[in-house]
């Protein structure tokens, strides 16, 4: 399964946030594909459409789709020098598909800051620099391989050589690979290098309890936003401490607590949704009397592979997919009405599943 790694310097609220994730945690029995590991937190993906579908179909049960966060603990500073725990930190980052980088924007004199005062930009740079140095090493190694062929005017080698120069220049200015623009051909080359600073990043700005309802007065958050924009990253604002409290509440209680605080959506829910998008994930639904359920696919997935997410037999025996768009189904009011209105299509194996499709698969067993 795709996973987002949570990183951050010590004392920024990383464990508090990760604990909130596992507290709010999904029933892992529902998700046999998810990893069972103390460093992995499985969360349900909040989706209003699933609630509306449940009201429409009235099934015996409803199952949201799930998503994994991995807590990447460990030493950060000096990681790229390749010593013990530092090395482990980098190899964990190598294994995740996106990064949630928690940065401290809250002031609390009782919580020591590892490098003195609150300064999220400096903190971000500490971690990013380690990743950039590791990538620089990757690029240098690659140089040694393509340089000779590039000199012989091998066309592919010349193109790769130019990409490597562009990357090296950026790294030397302490800029991550994701801040650069590349052509489609160049992107393929960059992908092949498996760079750490090419992974999508979401900065989670951890603000204090009294700022969460209106973080606009927090100058640190503004600085993080500006930095994120320059390097093609995203930002969300959370208060880890409050998330930990929210995670212990359920349903109505949770909503009341949020209303009292003047918050529309919990930071954790925002984090889950933003990470999902960052990974290019989409949701389709199955809706039967027994179960209404949301499923995760990468965007661009074809119908048989989407069926395979449910069960490998569904993919192997795929015949057709009966598909109705969520909005069309809701507008029609029932599956039958949608059929009568001609909104249910019978799609074959080349059909690309769209976010929000409600699908009934036909297959041979
Ligand atoms: P980690 O080292 O990054 O995992 O940080 P922790 O999650 O252990 O948090 C370090 C300290 O900061 C703990 O005492 C937390 O209670 C406190 N802390 C975390 N988030 C917040 C927050 O949003 N507001 C305040 N005031 N304290 C927080």
Image: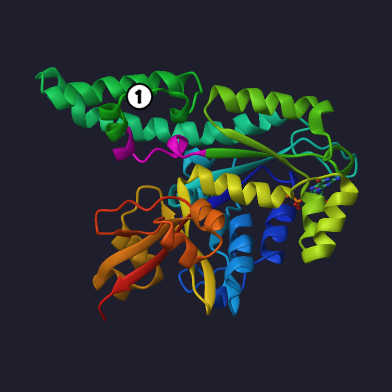
Q: How is this picture coloured?
A: rainbow
Q: Regarding mark 1 in the picture, which secondary structure is present there?
A: loop
> In the image, what residue occupies the spot 72% across and 65% down?
23
Horizontal and vertical percent position of residue 158:
18, 21
Q: Is residue 190 left or right of residue 251?
A: left
Horizontal and vertical percent position of residue 232:
52, 28
Residue 182 in sight from this viewpoint: yes
Q: Give the range drawn in magenta.
A: 190-200
Horizontal and vertical percent position of residue 136:
40, 30
> In the image, what residue occupies the spot 24% across and 23% down?
161
Q: Is residue 86 above or below residue 246?
A: above
Front-lying residue, 15 or 347: 347
Front-lying residue, 43 or 154: 43
Q: Is residue 361 above or below residue 233?
A: below
> In the image, what residue occupies the spot 48% across and 74% down?
32
Is 223 in the magenta? no
Horizontal and vertical percent position of residue 125:
61, 29
Is 195 in the magenta? yes
Residue occupying the far front of the picture:
340
Residue with the mark numbered 1:
182
């Amino acid at each position: 399964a795709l996973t987002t790694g949570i990183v951050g310097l010590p004392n920024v609220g990383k464990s508090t946030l990760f604990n909130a994730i596992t507290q709010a945690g999904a029933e892992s029995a529902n998700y046999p594909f998810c990893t069972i590991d103390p460093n992995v937190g499985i969360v349900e993906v909040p989706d209003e459409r699933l609630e509306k579908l449940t009201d429409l179909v009235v099934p015996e049960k409803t199952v949201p789709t799930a998503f994994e966060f991995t807590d990447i603990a460990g030493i950060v500073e000096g990681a790229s020098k390749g010593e013990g725990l530092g090395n482990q930190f980098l190899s964990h980052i190598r294994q995740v598909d996106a990064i949630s980088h928690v940065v401290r924007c809250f002031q609390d004199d009782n919580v020591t800051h590892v490098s003195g005062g609150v300064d999220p930009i400096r903190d971000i740079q500490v971690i990013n620099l380690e990743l950039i140095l590791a990538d620089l090493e990757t690029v240098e190694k690659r140089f040694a391989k393509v340089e000779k062929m590039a000199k012989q005017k091998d066309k592919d080698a010349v193109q790769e050589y130019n990409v490597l120069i562009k990357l090296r220049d950026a790294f030397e200015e302490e800029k991550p690979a994701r801040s650069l623009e590349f052509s489609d051909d160049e992107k393929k080359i960059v992908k092949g290098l498996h760079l750490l600073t090419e992974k999508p990043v979401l900065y989670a700005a951890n603000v204090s309890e009294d700022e969460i309802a209106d973080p606009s007065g927090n100058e640190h958050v503004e600085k993080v936003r500006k930095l994120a924009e320059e390097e093609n990253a995203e930002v969300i604002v959370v208060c880890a401490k409050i998330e930990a409290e929210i995670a212990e509440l359920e349903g109505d209680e949770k909503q009341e607590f949020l209303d009292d605080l003047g918050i529309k959506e919990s930071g954790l829910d925002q984090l889950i949704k933003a990470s999902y998008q960052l990974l290019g994930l989409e949701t389709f639904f199955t809706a039967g009397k027994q179960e209404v359920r949301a499923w995760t696919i990468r965007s661009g997935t074809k119908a048989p592979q989407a069926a395979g997410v449910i069960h490998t037999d569904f993919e192997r025996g795929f015949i057709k997919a009966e598909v109705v768009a969520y909005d069309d189904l809701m507008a029609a009011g029932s599956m039958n009405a949608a059929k009568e209105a001609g909104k249910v299509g019978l799609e074959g194996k080349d059909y690309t599943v769209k976010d929000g499709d409600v699908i009934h698969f036909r297959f041979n067993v």
